[in-house]
Amino acid sequence: MPAPPESAQPPVLFEAICTPARSLGRRGMRVLSIALLGLSAATGGLFLALGAWPILGFTGIEALLVLGLMTMHRRWSARAMEVLVLTGEQLTIHRTDGRGRQQEIAIDPYWARLRLEERPGRVSLLVLRQRGSEVEIGRLLGDEQKRSLAGALDQALRRLREPVFDNPQLRDGGGAIRPGSGS
């Protein structure tokens, strides 16, 4: 079966992929793990020297629990993402959470209004409104990234709602037929 022509899908006017910040790479995680296990071993050794040998097992279990939870959080945050795709027909928000659950929301871009709520001392809120319903976007982003996304998406929505038509006949000297020129 031949592939459908590419003109069948509307052109993408704006696309943004939002992922959570991951400042700790593999090497950093390895260094942190070694430091935590070393600190746990030193604490356990100190209590062993003082004669409180049962504490040794608890410090080891505690360190392994912390490292396990950190690894699970890193794995879940690596999976989480939000993709915003704007075409001439709709604005699609495709979300994937840390557990792999997916959600897709489609909004009419002509009626969509973007609002960035700045809150002092708290995380900003980026909301898309359409005919009485609201959708929060950019949940995974920090304040600066939300401001940047809000500016770019707002500009893309304005370009869609207020297109600029380039008609060569209306330009100065564009070869338009003038009355009385005989052509």
Image (cartoon, grey):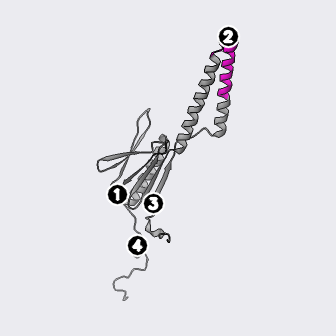
Q: Amino acid at mark 3?
A: Leu
Q: In screen coordinates, is 142 left or right of 26?
A: left
Discs 3, 4 touching: Cβ within 8 Å: no
Secondary structure of the residue carrying tag 1 is loop
Q: Which residue is mark 3?
A: 13
The answer for how far apart the CA atoms under marks 3 and 4 are is 21 Å
Label 3 vs label 4, nearer the camera = 3
In the image, residue 180 above or below residue 54 = below
Q: Which residue is mark 4?
A: 167
Query: Which disc number belongs to residue 53?
Result: none
In the image, residue 50 above or below residue 131 = above
Q: Residue furthest left?
A: 132
Q: Amino acid at mark 1?
A: Tyr
Residue 21 seen in this snapshot: no
The answer for how far apart the CA atoms under marks 2 and 1 are is 73 Å
Residue 78 seen in this snapshot: yes
Q: Which residue is mark 2?
A: 51
Secondary structure of the residue carrying tag 4 is loop
Question: First in sequence: mark 2 or mark 4?
Answer: 2
Question: First in sequence: mark 1 or mark 4?
Answer: 1
Front one among 150 and 182: 150
Secondary structure of the residue carrying tag 2 is loop
Question: First in sequence: mark 3 or mark 4?
Answer: 3
Magenta region, residue range: 35-54
* Percent coordinates x, y for residue 23 in the rendering: 59, 39
The rendered magenta stretch, by its main secondary structure, is classed as: helix
Q: Residues within 10 Å of mark 4 (few under 14, many from 20)?
A: few
Label 2 vs label 1, nearer the camera = 2
Label 1 vs label 4, nearer the camera = 1
